[in-house]
Image (tube, rainbow, N blue to C red):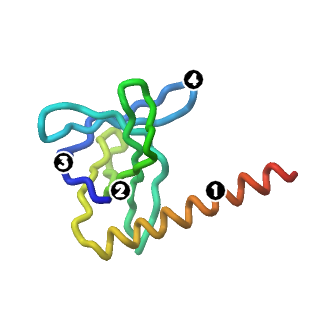
């Protein structure tokens, strides 16, 4: 599902206790939402970030994730990364398929890890 009501990335935060990286997004209505960074994928030589929106308690009950095109300034690592909407349906679908493969791989690694 596309999510088109975000303006920009606010800040990246790392919580040392659980090592979960989060970003804060500014909504068009002026409110903010914190999202956990699930992963960064590369599809057709472009990077995409997968975000899991969190409620005020830091949870996500429905499992919905959001995809954005992702880029960093190679010349200045202190600059905030840039997130861009994915407006092309084919591009969005390719990222969704790559994320499904990522999930399949993560589940396989978890199963194999349990057997060892």
Q: CA distance from mark 1 to mark 4?
A: 22 Å
SS type, badge 2: strand
One can see residue 74 in this view: no
Q: Position of residue 46 (x, y in %)?
A: 37, 67
The residue under the point 31% across, 76% down is 90
**Disc on res. 17:** 4
The secondary structure type at the circle numbered 1 is helix
Residue at which label 3 appears: 5
Vertical position of residue 89 compared to residue 63: above or below: below
Separation (CA) of disc 2 from disc 1: 18 Å
Q: Percent position (x, y) of residue 53?
A: 37, 40
Q: CA distance from mark 3 to mark 2?
A: 13 Å
Q: Tell me the element at label 4.
A: loop
| Residue 18 in sight here | yes
Q: Residue furthest front?
A: 62
To which residue does mark 1 refer?
Answer: 106
In the picture of the structure, the residue carrying the numbered disc 2 is: 67
* Left or right position of 42 against 106: left
Residue 68 percent coordinates (x, y): 32, 56
Residue lying farthest to the right in this orientation: 116
The residue drawn where x is 79% and y is 51% is 113
* Residue 24 rendering spot, x and y as whole percentages: 31, 35
Identify the mark nearer the N-term, 2 or 4: 4
* Distance of label 4 from label 3 (alpha carbons): 31 Å
User: For the residue carrying disc 4, how many other residues have a C-alpha within 10 Å: few (<14), some (14-19), or many (20+)?
Assistant: few
Q: Is residue 94 left or right of residue 107?
A: left
**CB under 8 Å between discs 4 and 3:** no
């Amino acid at each position: 599902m596309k999510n088109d009501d975000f303006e920009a990335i606010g800040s990246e935060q790392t919580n040392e206790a659980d090592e979960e990286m989060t970003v804060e997004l500014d909504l068009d209505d002026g409110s903010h939402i914190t999202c956990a960074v699930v992963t960064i994928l590369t599809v057709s030589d472009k990077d995409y970030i997968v975000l899991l929106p969190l409620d005020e308690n830091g949870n996500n009950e429905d499992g919905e994730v959001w995809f954005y095109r992702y880029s960093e300034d190679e010349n200045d690592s202190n600059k905030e990364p840039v997130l861009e909407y994915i407006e092309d349906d084919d591009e969005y679908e390719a990222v969704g398929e790559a994320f499904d493969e990522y999930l399949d791989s993560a589940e396989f690694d978890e199963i194999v890890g349990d057997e060892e």
